[in-house]
Image: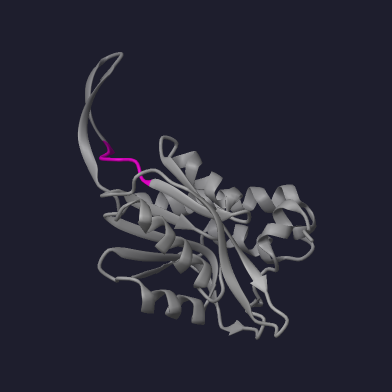
Amino acid sequence: MVHLLGNQHSIFDQFLMELRDEVIQKDSLRFRKNMERLGEIFAYEISKELSFTQKEVTTPLGAAQCLALAQQPVLATILRAGLPFHQGMLNFFDQAQNAFVSAYRKHHKDNTFTINIEYLSSPDLTGRILILSDPMLATGQSMLLAYRELLQHGKPEHTHFITLLASVEGIEYLKKHISSKDTSIWVGAVDDELTAQAYIVPGLGDAGDLAFGSKQ
C-alpha cells in the first residue's frame, strides 16, 4: 500500500515546498530542519498504524488509563542524506533502536552505475516494526538493496518504506520486488520524470549535498 502525505493542504506541503525551492535551499540549516520536520510528520502518521496497549499511570490526583506503544519500532536510514530525516522520526520514536546503511552510486565510464553497500549496523529485526527511510526514491535500487541487507539481521513483522520524493518508476520498482502483505510505502510527493542519469525531475537536487555540503 502506498500512502501519499503531500497535497493534503497541511503544513507538510509548506515544508516540502521549501525543500524544493532553490533559493531557500541555500540555507543548509533550514534545509536540514525542514527534513527533520517532515520526518516528525511521517513518524506521527505511521504511529497511527502501530499497536498500542492499555497502561495505567498515576497522576498527582489519581489513576489514569492511557495508551502506550506496544513496542518501539526500529528506525533505519541510508547515509548520509537520510540523517536529518531520520532525526525527525527519532524525535518522536525517542526510545527506538536504530540501524544505518551506507549506500552509494558507483558510476562507470559508460554512464551506468551500480549501488554499493559499504557499511551496515543494525539490531536484531526479528518480529520488529522496521521503518526504513531515504529522502529520494529515484530508481528504487538503493532502498531495495538496503532492505535486503537489513533482512540478514532478521525478518521484521512489518516494514514501512519512507521517502520525501519518489519517481513513478521508483515506486513501481519497489512494489514489484517487495511483499505487499508485510510492507507499506510512504511518500511525500511523486514526480513523473526520471532522467537517463536517474535523477528525479523536478525533484529537489542532491539532498545529501544540500544538507551537508558538496562532495568529491
Residue 6 appears in the figure: no
Is residue 201 positioned above or below 53 on the image?
A: below
Q: Main secondary structure of the magenta part?
A: loop
- Residue 29 visible in this rendered orientation of the protein: yes
Q: Write down the quadrant of residue 110 in the picture.
A: bottom right
Q: Residue 201: x, y in percent?
A: 65, 79
- In x, y percent, where is residue 150? 41, 56
| Magenta-drawn stretch contains 10 | no
Q: Is residue 1 left or right of residue 100?
A: left
Q: What colour scheme was applied to this rendering of the protein?
A: one colour
> Which residue shows up at 39% across the image and 46% down it?
74
Q: Quadrant of the C terminus?
A: bottom right
Relative depth, front residue between 188 and 75: 75
Rendering quarter of residue 68:
top left
Q: Is residue 205 left or right of residue 35?
A: right
What segment carries the magenta color?
68-73
User: Which one is in front, 100 or 184?
Assistant: 100
Q: Residue visible at 61% across and 57% down? A: 15
